Image (spheres, grey):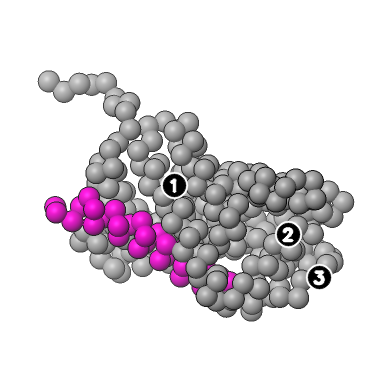
Amino acid sequence: MNDPRPRLDALTPPEMAEKAEAVGVAKAGLPAATTFALAVLAGAFIALGGMFATAVAAGGPGAWPWGVHRLFVGTAFSLGLVLVVVGGAELFTGNVLLVMAWRSGRLGAGRVLRNWALVLAGNAVGALGTAALATVAEFHAFGAGQVGAAALATADAKCALGFPRALALGVLCNALVCLAVWMNLAARTSADRVLVTIPPIAAFVACGFEHSVANLYAVPAALLARDLGGLEGAAPHLGWGAFLVDNLLPVTLGNVIGGGVLVAVVYQWVYLRRR
């Protein structure tokens, strides 16, 4: 006779791999409108985490040791992924784990790419929309302009990375993001999800790794504040062309490699290849 009580212990890694595969198939099977709407939410959630992190970053380097300051900023940013995994939304960097279902033959490449395209487009709408709202709200003026200065410095540094460095930082970032999503597969409660999400996300921000969806908020928010909101400050590398070519493109490619190869392919090979 089956025990009707819910299972309370965490899943084992092989069970997590099976679940990741099934979740990937389910995500790819969602209607396009549903996928897009949930992706818009995820883009906005990550942008809200970015706003929180920018507020925490403002004026901080002079008051705290660099590492402590970065830890605070990273912990604040983790709000974004907590909202995604607990609130339910579709995030491109997490959906890179669909590679597991593709590797197992349960999803065709076309369905994976369709999901990624829809989700990335929705994430962009959510992030850019939040950046526009932040500009109208004059978020950059908070803290006597310190928030705007922090946003401008962060965005300028992102555009100055160069292609190889941005690619490598994108790989490192999404390895941690997908590990956070992977550990969420074992979670049984909302508290579990929060606890396993914060450390990897705080780590990638503290270390300065690059996240494509976060950058879809951070750089446009600084550009809009500068071009439309009257934000002033030195940002010699900051521009739409530099953002798209020198940051967003290599970071997105790096995110696919970091999550798709270093996490999805490895775990699929370890736990599902014999099946």
Q: Give coordinates of residue 228: x percent, y percent.
A: 79, 67
Q: Which residues are magenta?
A: 247-275
Horizontal side, residue 88 vs residue 125: left or right: left
Tag 2: residue type?
Answer: Ala
Please say if the residues under marks 1 and 2 sit with CB atoms less than 8 Å apart.
no
Give the residue at x 55% y 76%.
163
Horizontal side, residue 115 vs residue 198: left or right: left
Does residue 56 belong to the magenta stretch? Answer: no
Q: Residue furthest right?
A: 144
Q: Nearer the viewer, residue 112 or 152?
A: 152
Please say if the residues under marks 2 and 3 sit with CB atoms less than 8 Å apart.
no
Q: Nearer the viewer, residue 221 or 174?
A: 174
Q: Residues within 10 Å of mark 1 (few under 14, many from 20)?
A: many
Give the secondary structure at mark 3.
loop
Query: Main SS of the magenta segment?
Result: helix
Visible residue check, residue 17: yes
Give the residue at x 50% y 47%.
200
Q: Nearer the viewer, residue 11 or 92?
A: 11
Earlier-in-chain disc, 3 versus 1: 1
Q: Give coordinates of residue 73: x percent, y percent.
A: 66, 48
Q: Residues within 10 Å of mark 2 (few under 14, many from 20)?
A: many
Q: CA distance from mark 1 to mark 2?
A: 26 Å
Horizontal side, residue 82 vs residue 6: left or right: right
Which label number is shown at residue 97?
none
Q: Residues within 10 Å of mark 3 (few under 14, many from 20)?
A: few
Tag 3: residue type?
Answer: Ala
Q: Which residue is mark 3?
A: 234
Which label number is shown at residue 151?
2
Q: Which residue is mark 1?
A: 180
Q: CA distance from mark 3 to mark 1?
A: 36 Å
